[in-house]
Image: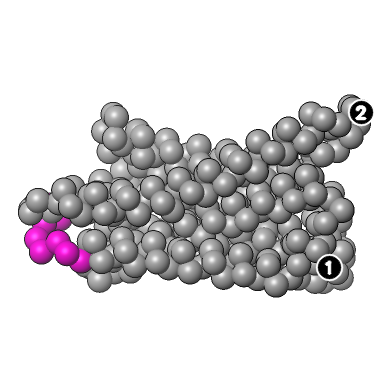
Amino acid sequence: MNILFPLLFGLFLSMYLVTVLGNLLIILAVSCDSHLHTPMYFFLSNLSLADIGFTSTTIPKMIVGIQTQSRAISYVGCLTQMSFLILFGCMDSMLLTAMAYDRFVAICHPLHYSVIMNPRLCGLLVLLSVFVSLLDSQLHNLTVLQLTCFKDMEISNFFCDPSQLLSLACSDTSTNNIVMYFVGAISGFLPISGIFFSYYKIVSSILRVSSAGGKYKAFSTCGSHLSVVCLFYGTAIGVYLGSALLPSPRKDMVASVVYTVVTPMLNPFIYSLRNRDIKSALWRFLRRTG
């Protein structure tokens, strides 16, 4: 185990640095390049900011724990970590929904795109994402605060998961479980429904295009977003379904690492490698700074 700790420390530190630097580059490229001052890249820069917050909630604490070989966290620290984790995770979900709506308007209503996706609406969508995420986070926090005692002090994960905190409670948590899963269903089900509806309309619209080149061009504008959606929701659903159907602390921890570490790290690569505008903006930004 002593040999494993330095390897884990180096691995997670490098993954965290890549995540932060990659997402910061996306934010800087979008803010510094006037060609990218469009709704899609406005949402993308906010998504990158949420990803930085999402990973910064858990990974630094885990890196310090590996270095000091201490896995302890205070009750207040646990609640704080849980609040910010849900806040940024829900923001990711809401912003991906806003991006799906943006692609729906761009492909299905191209002539009215600039009128519909005006700066005021884009700002309102981001503010709505923040508000819903804050509400979701605080409702989870209030639910956990109702617990008075815990039968065990050990969480089988590297961060404070609300569902695992409920499972450690001494008292009956059936009402708390109902409230938490209801809130989770609203913050998870509604964004997924919005994304599915947007892509149903997008696919229907693209299939009506006669030329193969036109279909490819339309699909290519959605490729990066669809890849991120599948990665984000695929791992998230895997974490919760896996823990519900086949409880295994080790498998849950691996799935959680993919969900909270790997996904935010891959997002900048997906958008930069599959998007010519981002690649060009990054090269221009790096040339200017160099």
Query: Where, quadrant-wise, is the N terminus in this rendering?
Result: top left
User: What number is the disc on residue 211?
Assistant: 2
Magenta-drawn stretch contains 153: yes
Q: Nearer the viewer, residue 13 or 124?
A: 124
Q: Which residue is mark 1?
A: 33
Q: Quadrant of residue 165?
A: bottom left
- For marks 1 and 2 on the same chain, the one whose residue lies earlier in the sequence: 1
Q: Residue at x 56, y 52 (%)?
A: 264
The amino acid type found where label 1 is placed reads Asp
- Residue 135 at x, y percent in the picture: 40, 66
Image location of residue 162, percent across then percent down = 28, 54
Q: Residue at x 30, y 36 (%)?
A: 243
Q: Secondary structure at mark 2?
A: loop
> Residue flagged by tag 2: what amino acid is it?
Ser
Magenta residues (range):
145-154
Q: Residue at x 80, y 63 (%)?
A: 115
